[in-house]
Amino acid sequence: MSKERARRRAEREAERARAMRVNEERQARGARRRALLARLVPRPVRVRRQGGLIARRHRVQNVVVGAAFLLVQALAWLMWGSPAVSFAVLVLSLLLIPVVVTLAFDRRT
């Protein structure tokens, strides 16, 4: 009786070892395939927005600054209509944006 149990246990262990070997080969094949695919197909870089209160506040402030810039440009074009004056207002606006942002939103760092 014990010889029979030992034989069956040996068969089970051999079957388990064979199944583990097959599983390891399958996983190794999958890993090689994934590595090859990663080398061949470039993945796009995901750009995620920062979350949180400070990031949201900066986004809102940037939108306000952009809207004010566009409003100033539109008013300059409507009031004077001259391309030279509009260009001068554009250059002046671009130079003053950092100053306005620093003073209005206290972004000194």
Image (cartoon, helix red, strand yellow):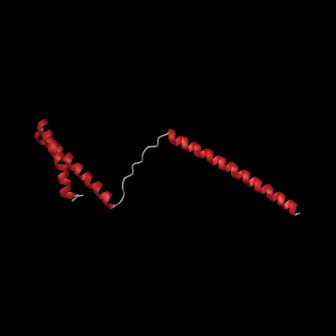
Residue nearest the viewer, comparing 84 with 41: 41
Q: Tell whether 79 sits left or right of 65.
A: left
Q: Is residue 21 above or below residue 5?
A: above
Q: Tell whether 30 sits left or right of 103.
A: right
Q: Quadrant of residue 12?
A: bottom right
Q: Tell whether 63 sits left or right of 39.
A: left
Q: In the image, residue 18 lies at what x, y percent?
A: 73, 50
Residue found farthest to the right:
1
**Image quadrant occupied by the C terminus:** bottom left
Q: Quadrant of residue 101?
A: bottom left
**Image quadrant occupied by the N terminus:** bottom right
Q: Is residue 106 above or below residue 44?
A: below
Residue found farthest to the bottom:
2
* Residue at figure coordinates x 76%, y 53% from the top left: 15
Q: In the image, residue 82 lies at what x, y percent?
A: 11, 36
* Residue at figure coordinates x 20%, y 51% from the top left: 98
Q: In the image, residue 36 lies at what x, y percent?
A: 55, 41
Q: Is residue 38 visible?
A: yes
Q: Is residue 61 above or below residue 43?
A: below
Residue nearest the viewer, comparing 95 with 61: 95
Q: Is residue 82 visible?
A: no
* Residue at figure coordinates x 84%, y 57% from the top left: 7
Callout count? 0
* Residue at figure coordinates x 58%, y 42% from the top left: 33
Q: In the image, residue 104 lies at what x, y percent?
A: 19, 57
